[in-house]
Image: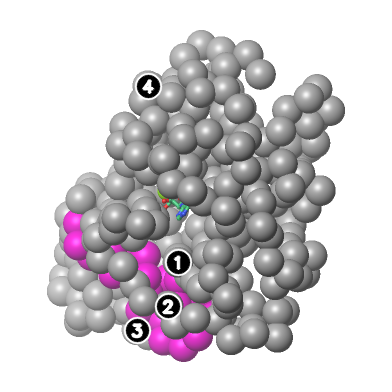
Amino acid sequence: MSGDLVAFPTETVYGLGADACNSKAVAKIYEVKGRPADHPLIVHIASLDGLGDWAREIPEYAIELARGLWPGPMTLVLKRSELAGDFITGGQDTVGVRVPDHAVALSLLTAFEKVGGKGVAAPSANRFGHVSPTNAAAVVEELGQYLSENDIVLDGGACQVGVESTIIDCTGATPRILRPGAISELMINECTGLLCAEFRPQTTTGEDIRVSGSLENHYAPAAKVFLDHTPLPGQGFIADAKLQTPEGVIRLASPANDEEFARLLYSVLRAADAQGLTEVVVAQPNGTGIAVAIRDRLARAANGR
Ligand code: TXA
Ligand code: MG
Protein backbone atom coordinates (compact mmCIF):
# COMPACT_ATOMS: atom_id res chain seq x y z
CA MET A 1 0.00 0.00 0.00
CA SER A 2 2.92 2.29 0.82
CA GLY A 3 4.18 1.98 -2.72
CA ASP A 4 7.29 -0.01 -1.91
CA LEU A 5 8.31 -3.24 -3.62
CA VAL A 6 8.47 -6.75 -2.19
CA ALA A 7 10.30 -9.58 -3.90
CA PHE A 8 8.72 -12.88 -2.86
CA PRO A 9 8.99 -16.60 -3.57
CA THR A 10 6.39 -18.53 -5.53
CA GLU A 11 6.44 -22.19 -6.56
CA THR A 12 7.60 -21.20 -10.07
CA VAL A 13 10.14 -18.36 -9.75
CA TYR A 14 10.59 -15.31 -7.49
CA GLY A 15 8.35 -12.32 -8.25
CA LEU A 16 8.94 -8.60 -7.78
CA GLY A 17 5.67 -7.35 -6.33
CA ALA A 18 3.84 -4.06 -5.90
CA ASP A 19 0.28 -3.04 -4.99
CA ALA A 20 -1.56 -3.73 -8.26
CA CYS A 21 -3.83 -0.71 -7.65
CA ASN A 22 -0.97 1.76 -7.17
CA SER A 23 0.32 3.03 -10.51
CA LYS A 24 3.38 4.68 -8.94
CA ALA A 25 4.41 1.47 -7.21
CA VAL A 26 3.92 -0.50 -10.42
CA ALA A 27 6.01 2.06 -12.30
CA LYS A 28 8.85 1.25 -9.90
CA ILE A 29 8.69 -2.40 -10.98
CA TYR A 30 9.29 -1.40 -14.59
CA GLU A 31 12.15 0.85 -13.54
CA VAL A 32 13.86 -1.79 -11.40
CA LYS A 33 13.45 -4.46 -14.08
CA GLY A 34 14.43 -2.18 -16.93
CA ARG A 35 11.33 -3.50 -18.69
CA PRO A 36 9.40 -1.67 -21.44
CA ALA A 37 6.22 -0.17 -19.94
CA ASP A 38 3.84 -1.70 -22.46
CA HIS A 39 4.43 -5.25 -21.23
CA PRO A 40 1.55 -6.51 -19.07
CA LEU A 41 2.02 -7.84 -15.52
CA ILE A 42 0.40 -10.78 -13.76
CA VAL A 43 -1.82 -9.90 -10.79
CA HIS A 44 -1.34 -12.33 -7.88
CA ILE A 45 -4.31 -12.93 -5.58
CA ALA A 46 -4.81 -15.05 -2.45
CA SER A 47 -7.70 -17.15 -3.77
CA LEU A 48 -10.25 -17.58 -6.53
CA ASP A 49 -12.56 -15.27 -4.53
CA GLY A 50 -10.60 -12.27 -5.75
CA LEU A 51 -10.82 -13.13 -9.45
CA GLY A 52 -14.04 -11.18 -9.99
CA ASP A 53 -12.30 -8.00 -8.81
CA TRP A 54 -9.92 -8.16 -11.77
CA ALA A 55 -11.79 -9.92 -14.58
CA ARG A 56 -15.20 -9.92 -16.25
CA GLU A 57 -17.04 -12.28 -18.59
CA ILE A 58 -15.20 -15.23 -17.05
CA PRO A 59 -16.04 -18.39 -19.04
CA GLU A 60 -17.10 -21.55 -17.23
CA TYR A 61 -13.94 -23.40 -18.30
CA ALA A 62 -11.78 -20.71 -16.66
CA ILE A 63 -13.65 -21.21 -13.38
CA GLU A 64 -13.05 -24.96 -13.71
CA LEU A 65 -9.35 -24.37 -14.25
CA ALA A 66 -9.16 -22.01 -11.29
CA ARG A 67 -11.09 -24.43 -9.03
CA GLY A 68 -9.05 -27.42 -10.14
CA LEU A 69 -5.53 -26.02 -10.45
CA TRP A 70 -5.21 -22.99 -8.13
CA PRO A 71 -3.19 -22.43 -6.09
CA GLY A 72 -0.74 -23.50 -8.76
CA PRO A 73 1.63 -22.63 -11.61
CA MET A 74 -1.10 -21.29 -13.89
CA THR A 75 -1.99 -17.76 -15.04
CA LEU A 76 -5.39 -17.08 -16.58
CA VAL A 77 -5.73 -14.29 -19.13
CA LEU A 78 -9.25 -12.87 -19.03
CA LYS A 79 -11.15 -9.74 -20.06
CA ARG A 80 -10.15 -7.10 -17.57
CA SER A 81 -12.37 -5.30 -15.06
CA GLU A 82 -12.16 -1.57 -14.41
CA LEU A 83 -9.81 -2.23 -11.52
CA ALA A 84 -7.15 -3.51 -13.92
CA GLY A 85 -5.53 -0.29 -15.08
CA ASP A 86 -3.56 0.25 -18.27
CA PHE A 87 -0.41 0.26 -16.14
CA ILE A 88 -1.09 -3.44 -15.34
CA THR A 89 -2.38 -4.64 -18.69
CA GLY A 90 -0.08 -2.65 -20.95
CA GLY A 91 -3.22 -1.01 -22.33
CA GLN A 92 -4.76 -4.30 -23.48
CA ASP A 93 -8.33 -5.30 -22.74
CA THR A 94 -7.19 -8.42 -20.87
CA VAL A 95 -5.53 -9.13 -17.55
CA GLY A 96 -3.40 -12.05 -16.33
CA VAL A 97 -4.27 -13.40 -12.86
CA ARG A 98 -2.75 -16.15 -10.75
CA VAL A 99 -2.94 -17.73 -7.26
CA PRO A 100 0.58 -18.99 -6.47
CA ASP A 101 1.14 -22.21 -4.56
CA HIS A 102 3.69 -21.12 -1.98
CA ALA A 103 3.13 -20.62 1.74
CA VAL A 104 5.12 -17.36 1.90
CA ALA A 105 3.39 -15.91 -1.17
CA LEU A 106 -0.04 -16.88 0.13
CA SER A 107 0.69 -15.37 3.58
CA LEU A 108 1.79 -12.15 1.91
CA LEU A 109 -1.28 -12.02 -0.34
CA THR A 110 -3.69 -12.89 2.47
CA ALA A 111 -2.16 -10.29 4.80
CA PHE A 112 -2.35 -7.72 2.01
CA GLU A 113 -6.04 -8.46 1.41
CA LYS A 114 -6.72 -8.12 5.14
CA VAL A 115 -5.57 -4.52 5.03
CA GLY A 116 -7.72 -3.79 1.98
CA GLY A 117 -5.31 -4.75 -0.82
CA LYS A 118 -6.79 -6.27 -3.99
CA GLY A 119 -3.77 -7.95 -5.52
CA VAL A 120 -0.03 -7.85 -6.04
CA ALA A 121 1.33 -7.21 -9.52
CA ALA A 122 4.52 -9.18 -9.99
CA PRO A 123 6.75 -10.07 -12.90
CA SER A 124 9.67 -12.42 -12.38
CA ALA A 125 12.29 -10.67 -10.21
CA ASN A 126 15.02 -10.37 -12.86
CA ARG A 127 16.29 -7.64 -15.15
CA PHE A 128 14.43 -7.64 -18.47
CA GLY A 129 15.46 -10.54 -20.71
CA HIS A 130 17.55 -12.29 -18.07
CA VAL A 131 17.07 -15.69 -16.44
CA SER A 132 14.35 -15.68 -13.74
CA PRO A 133 15.58 -16.06 -10.15
CA THR A 134 14.64 -19.26 -8.33
CA ASN A 135 16.11 -18.38 -4.94
CA ALA A 136 16.42 -15.25 -2.83
CA ALA A 137 20.18 -14.87 -3.39
CA ALA A 138 19.57 -14.75 -7.16
CA VAL A 139 17.02 -11.94 -6.64
CA VAL A 140 19.55 -9.89 -4.68
CA GLU A 141 22.21 -10.56 -7.30
CA GLU A 142 19.85 -9.45 -10.12
CA LEU A 143 18.11 -6.50 -8.53
CA GLY A 144 19.88 -5.60 -5.29
CA GLN A 145 21.53 -2.51 -6.73
CA TYR A 146 18.23 -1.21 -8.17
CA LEU A 147 16.06 -1.67 -5.06
CA SER A 148 15.41 1.13 -2.55
CA GLU A 149 15.91 1.08 1.20
CA ASN A 150 12.25 0.28 1.95
CA ASP A 151 11.92 -2.50 -0.61
CA ILE A 152 12.23 -6.01 0.80
CA VAL A 153 13.23 -9.47 -0.41
CA LEU A 154 11.41 -12.38 1.29
CA ASP A 155 13.44 -15.58 1.43
CA GLY A 156 11.31 -18.69 0.95
CA GLY A 157 14.07 -21.02 -0.16
CA ALA A 158 14.45 -22.54 -3.62
CA CYS A 159 11.40 -22.63 -5.92
CA GLN A 160 9.89 -26.08 -6.36
CA VAL A 161 8.86 -25.82 -10.02
CA GLY A 162 11.64 -23.62 -11.40
CA VAL A 163 10.04 -22.36 -14.64
CA GLU A 164 7.34 -19.71 -14.95
CA SER A 165 3.62 -20.43 -14.84
CA THR A 166 1.61 -21.75 -17.76
CA ILE A 167 -0.25 -18.77 -19.24
CA ILE A 168 -3.68 -19.64 -20.63
CA ASP A 169 -5.70 -17.30 -22.81
CA CYS A 170 -9.29 -17.71 -21.59
CA THR A 171 -10.92 -15.15 -23.87
CA GLY A 172 -11.87 -17.60 -26.63
CA ALA A 173 -14.28 -20.53 -26.89
CA THR A 174 -11.55 -22.91 -25.70
CA PRO A 175 -8.40 -22.40 -23.61
CA ARG A 176 -5.19 -21.55 -25.47
CA ILE A 177 -1.70 -21.86 -24.04
CA LEU A 178 0.35 -18.67 -24.52
CA ARG A 179 3.36 -19.83 -22.47
CA PRO A 180 3.92 -23.47 -21.52
CA GLY A 181 4.69 -24.33 -17.89
CA ALA A 182 4.17 -27.08 -15.32
CA ILE A 183 0.42 -27.14 -15.99
CA SER A 184 0.38 -29.12 -19.21
CA GLU A 185 -2.01 -29.19 -22.14
CA LEU A 186 -3.22 -32.60 -20.99
CA MET A 187 -4.00 -31.30 -17.49
CA ILE A 188 -5.97 -28.41 -18.98
CA ASN A 189 -7.93 -30.71 -21.27
CA GLU A 190 -8.69 -33.09 -18.42
CA CYS A 191 -9.73 -30.30 -16.07
CA THR A 192 -12.06 -28.56 -18.53
CA GLY A 193 -13.23 -31.43 -20.74
CA LEU A 194 -12.22 -29.22 -23.69
CA LEU A 195 -9.36 -29.43 -26.15
CA CYS A 196 -6.79 -26.65 -25.86
CA ALA A 197 -6.37 -24.52 -28.95
CA GLU A 198 -3.03 -25.35 -30.54
CA PHE A 199 0.05 -23.73 -28.94
CA ARG A 200 1.88 -21.71 -31.54
CA PRO A 201 5.10 -20.32 -30.14
CA GLN A 202 5.16 -16.62 -30.93
CA THR A 203 8.43 -15.20 -32.10
CA THR A 204 7.66 -11.52 -31.73
CA THR A 205 5.83 -9.46 -29.14
CA GLY A 206 2.83 -9.30 -31.45
CA GLU A 207 0.27 -6.53 -31.62
CA ASP A 208 -2.80 -8.03 -29.99
CA ILE A 209 -1.54 -10.11 -27.08
CA ARG A 210 1.88 -9.34 -25.69
CA VAL A 211 3.60 -12.09 -23.81
CA SER A 212 6.98 -10.63 -23.02
CA GLY A 213 8.43 -14.06 -22.46
CA SER A 214 7.59 -14.71 -26.08
CA LEU A 215 10.34 -12.42 -27.30
CA GLU A 216 12.83 -14.50 -29.23
CA ASN A 217 15.69 -13.71 -26.90
CA HIS A 218 14.64 -14.00 -23.29
CA TYR A 219 15.48 -16.12 -20.29
CA ALA A 220 19.10 -15.80 -21.40
CA PRO A 221 22.27 -16.11 -19.33
CA ALA A 222 25.45 -14.24 -20.27
CA ALA A 223 27.00 -17.51 -21.50
CA LYS A 224 26.10 -18.62 -25.00
CA VAL A 225 23.68 -21.56 -24.94
CA PHE A 226 23.89 -24.36 -27.51
CA LEU A 227 21.21 -27.01 -27.77
CA ASP A 228 21.72 -30.71 -28.42
CA HIS A 229 25.36 -30.41 -29.54
CA THR A 230 28.14 -32.74 -28.49
CA PRO A 231 29.92 -30.66 -25.82
CA LEU A 232 33.58 -29.77 -26.33
CA PRO A 233 36.29 -29.56 -23.68
CA GLY A 234 35.88 -26.40 -21.61
CA GLN A 235 32.18 -26.05 -22.34
CA GLY A 236 29.54 -26.44 -19.63
CA PHE A 237 27.06 -29.31 -20.02
CA ILE A 238 23.54 -29.81 -18.66
CA ALA A 239 21.94 -33.15 -19.45
CA ASP A 240 19.87 -36.00 -18.08
CA ALA A 241 21.72 -38.16 -15.57
CA LYS A 242 21.80 -41.03 -18.09
CA LEU A 243 24.02 -39.04 -20.49
CA GLN A 244 27.77 -39.23 -19.96
CA THR A 245 30.17 -36.33 -19.76
CA PRO A 246 32.83 -36.29 -22.52
CA GLU A 247 36.39 -35.74 -21.33
CA GLY A 248 37.28 -32.15 -20.42
CA VAL A 249 33.64 -31.01 -20.41
CA ILE A 250 32.36 -29.25 -17.27
CA ARG A 251 29.26 -31.09 -16.13
CA LEU A 252 26.92 -28.53 -14.53
CA ALA A 253 23.87 -30.68 -13.76
CA SER A 254 22.58 -34.23 -14.16
CA PRO A 255 18.84 -34.13 -13.46
CA ALA A 256 17.18 -37.51 -12.95
CA ASN A 257 13.86 -36.44 -14.49
CA ASP A 258 12.10 -33.52 -16.21
CA GLU A 259 10.79 -32.02 -12.97
CA GLU A 260 14.29 -31.88 -11.55
CA PHE A 261 15.54 -30.48 -14.86
CA ALA A 262 13.07 -27.59 -14.60
CA ARG A 263 13.83 -27.00 -10.93
CA LEU A 264 17.60 -26.77 -11.52
CA LEU A 265 17.79 -25.12 -14.92
CA TYR A 266 17.84 -21.41 -14.07
CA SER A 267 20.09 -21.70 -11.02
CA VAL A 268 22.54 -23.80 -13.03
CA LEU A 269 22.62 -21.26 -15.87
CA ARG A 270 23.34 -18.60 -13.24
CA ALA A 271 26.07 -20.75 -11.75
CA ALA A 272 27.63 -21.11 -15.22
CA ASP A 273 27.81 -17.32 -15.49
CA ALA A 274 29.23 -17.05 -11.97
CA GLN A 275 31.93 -19.57 -12.91
CA GLY A 276 32.77 -17.44 -15.93
CA LEU A 277 31.84 -20.11 -18.48
CA THR A 278 31.19 -18.59 -21.87
CA GLU A 279 29.52 -21.58 -23.53
CA VAL A 280 26.99 -24.04 -22.18
CA VAL A 281 25.58 -27.02 -24.05
CA VAL A 282 22.17 -28.35 -23.00
CA ALA A 283 20.77 -31.73 -24.03
CA GLN A 284 17.06 -30.97 -24.13
CA PRO A 285 14.55 -33.33 -22.55
CA ASN A 286 12.08 -34.69 -25.07
CA GLY A 287 8.56 -35.60 -24.21
CA THR A 288 5.47 -33.78 -23.04
CA GLY A 289 4.51 -32.19 -19.72
CA ILE A 290 7.04 -29.78 -18.25
CA ALA A 291 9.60 -30.79 -20.92
CA VAL A 292 7.62 -28.58 -23.34
CA ALA A 293 8.22 -25.58 -21.06
CA ILE A 294 11.91 -26.43 -20.65
CA ARG A 295 12.41 -26.58 -24.43
CA ASP A 296 10.47 -23.33 -24.87
CA ARG A 297 12.75 -21.47 -22.43
CA LEU A 298 15.92 -23.08 -23.79
CA ALA A 299 15.05 -22.11 -27.35
CA ARG A 300 14.90 -18.47 -26.23
CA ALA A 301 17.97 -18.73 -24.04
CA ALA A 302 19.85 -20.08 -27.06
CA ASN A 303 18.99 -16.90 -28.98
CA GLY A 304 21.14 -14.98 -26.51
CA ARG A 305 20.69 -11.61 -24.90
O1 TXA B 1 5.32 -17.95 -12.77
C1 TXA B 1 5.08 -16.79 -13.10
O2 TXA B 1 4.18 -16.50 -13.88
C2 TXA B 1 5.96 -15.68 -12.46
C3 TXA B 1 5.66 -15.62 -10.98
C4 TXA B 1 6.38 -14.48 -10.31
O3 TXA B 1 4.28 -15.55 -10.78
N1 TXA B 1 5.70 -14.43 -13.11
C5 TXA B 1 6.12 -14.16 -14.36
O4 TXA B 1 5.85 -12.83 -14.73
O5 TXA B 1 6.66 -14.94 -15.08
P1 TXA B 1 6.54 -12.16 -16.00
O6 TXA B 1 6.02 -10.75 -15.99
O7 TXA B 1 7.97 -12.33 -15.96
O8 TXA B 1 5.88 -12.90 -17.16
C6 TXA B 1 4.49 -12.81 -17.27
C7 TXA B 1 4.10 -12.95 -18.67
C8 TXA B 1 4.65 -11.86 -19.52
O9 TXA B 1 5.26 -12.47 -20.62
C9 TXA B 1 3.44 -11.05 -19.91
O10 TXA B 1 3.56 -10.49 -21.17
C10 TXA B 1 2.34 -12.09 -19.83
O11 TXA B 1 2.67 -12.83 -18.72
N2 TXA B 1 1.04 -11.47 -19.62
C11 TXA B 1 0.61 -10.79 -18.55
N3 TXA B 1 -0.62 -10.29 -18.76
C12 TXA B 1 -0.98 -10.70 -19.99
C13 TXA B 1 -2.13 -10.50 -20.80
N4 TXA B 1 -3.15 -9.77 -20.39
N5 TXA B 1 -2.14 -11.06 -22.02
C14 TXA B 1 -1.10 -11.78 -22.45
N6 TXA B 1 0.01 -11.99 -21.75
C15 TXA B 1 0.08 -11.46 -20.54
MG1 MG C 1 9.78 -12.78 -16.65
In the picture, measured across the screen, residue 54 lies left or right of residue 251, that is right
Which numbered disc flags the more N-terminal residue, 2 or 3?
Answer: 2
What is the quadrant of the N terminus in the image? top right
Q: Nearer the viewer, residue 233 or 174?
A: 174
The reply to whether residue 282 is visible in this rendering is: yes
**Residue at horizontal 76%, vertical 44%?**
50
**From the viewer's perspective, is 105 left or right of 8?**
right
Question: Of residues 79 and 185, which is closer to you in this image?
Answer: 79
| Contact between labelled residues 1 and 4, with CB atoms less than 8 Å apart | no
Residue 185, position as x, y percentages in the image: 56, 80
Q: Ligand 1 within 8 A of label 1's CB? A: yes
Specify which label sits upstream in the sequence, 4 or 2: 4
The image shows residue 275 at horizontal and vertical percentages of 28, 48
* Circles 2 and 3: CB atoms closer than 8 Å: no
C-alpha distance separating marks 4 and 2: 37 Å
Amino acid type at mark 4: Gln
Q: Measure the C-alpha gap from mark 3 to mark 4.
A: 40 Å
- Which residue, given by chain and number where applicable, does mark 1 sit on? 178
Name the residue type under label 3. Gln
Q: Please say if the residues under marks 2 and 1 sit with CB atoms less than 8 Å apart.
A: yes
Residue named by callout 4: 145
The residue wearing badge 2 is: 199
Count residues near mark 4 (Cα–Cα under 10 Å), then give few for <14, some for 14-19, many for 20+: few
Helix, strand or loop for disc 1: strand
